[in-house]
Amino acid sequence: MNRYEQAKQMFAAYGVDTDAAIGKLAGIPVSVHCWQGDDVIGFDGAGSLEGGIQTTGNYPGRARTPEELMADLKFAFSLMTGKKRLNLHASYAILGGDAGKVDRDAYRPEHFAPWVKFAKEIGLDGIDFNPTFFSHPKVKNGLTLSSPDEETRKFWVRHGQACLKISEYFAEQFGTPCLMNIWIADGLKDVPADRLTPRLRLKQSLDEILSAPYDKNKVVVAVESKVFGIGLESYTVGSNEFYQNYAATRGICCLLDNGHYHPLEYVSDKIPSLLAFYDRVALHVTRGVRWDSDHVVLLEDELKEICKEIVRGNATEKVMIGLDYFDASINRISAWVVGERNMQKALLFALLQPNERLKAMQEEGNFTEQMMLQEELKMLPYGDVWEEYLARNGFAGSDWFQSVRAYEKDVLAKRR
């Protein structure tokens, strides 16, 4: 009997079907963010990252062109398991002959057609999208959609409306809904004199974006809060309370980024609260470290708890999972693969819990046995089930990190 068969029997003793868990895991899409590969610079002329976020490190091999980023993504995706999507920011438009002539408020689907071609060629499930409200000359005094300057505010409204059309284009091309997530860094470095008025302008701007016609069956619009940004520490216009109320009153989706809250707030606890009211919940999965929100995803307790809540709530088709981190201090492809695989491992961990049995114990008030069982489950051989999952998906015996080392030597190291 091999190790998987032994593990299968051990889990079966707790009422868990490992084959069913493996099959379920293979069908849960994870949207992988393009911006890990080039340090969030994009291709529309930004030159540097600005607007409440920061990438640190200078590891060799950053992608500098669409061709380099696509090559790196293709290689990274070849080392990832499961159903995958691509998550794009608007700043990754491939403008071609329109470079310097077309600004973000006039981006069109054809500026992203090469990404559609690329995603189809490597068999991705679809593309998700993000308007880019940072790293641009028209970010005025740290504000975009909440700017008191009407010309500035209107520019960013038009950008949001243009992104709705692009998102609909992605959905039509792949036959799956496109998540269009709105995050803005708008805020102030020091104590504000007026917290309300910028939020009223943001409310107006979002209403104007959503007034543009789009198919809600094809585009899932989400809003993403943040507790603060770099250089914007004292006040964030798009707070959690603002966006949850806005989403609830406008029939759109809340996106939870688990690095965008106070360190003692847990997104795992927020997921079931939102599922009680929303048809869909979106996630950007990252790893917060003190003040920073975008470290590579590791297989930590909170990630496991996030995935438990998705699985326990029968919400694998309701929660839209995306990754969001960027680390320029290590090999960028390794960062992609480590994070995506850890997301998959955490989902598998959740799928291998006897969730119905544990729920019944809670309902019966049987807390003593519930605690004992939860602790016993921690020592089961999850790794053996993971290895079987890899084998069934064509990764048996492969040392993926050696492939990354070779790619670094042959490709990345030559980018000087």
Image (tube, rainbow, N blue to C red):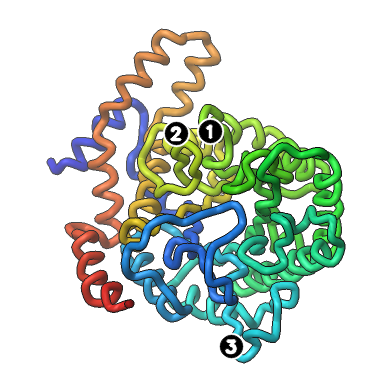
Q: Amino acid at mark 1?
A: Ser
Front residue (pair 339, 119): 339
Mark 3 Cα shell of 10 Å, populated few (<14), some (14-19), many (≥20): few
Q: Secondary structure at mark 1?
A: helix
Residue drawn at (69%, 55%) of the image:
142
Screen quadrant of the C terminus = bottom left
Q: Secondary structure at mark 2?
A: helix
The reply to whether dot 3 and dot 2 touch (C-beta < 8 Å) is: no
Residue drawn at (42%, 55%) of the image:
56
Name the residue that disc number 1 marks.
Answer: 268
Q: Secondary structure at mark 3?
A: helix
The reply to whether dot 2 and dot 1 touch (C-beta < 8 Å) is: yes
Name the residue that disc number 2 marks.
Answer: 302
**Image: 151 above or below 27:** below
Front residue (pair 415, 160): 415
Name the residue that disc number 3 marks.
Answer: 96
Percent position (x, y) of residue 110? 64, 82
Q: Amino acid at mark 2?
A: Glu
* Structural distance between the alpha carbons of marks 2 and 1: 7 Å
Q: Amino acid at mark 3?
A: Gly
Percent position (x, y) of residue 194? 82, 39
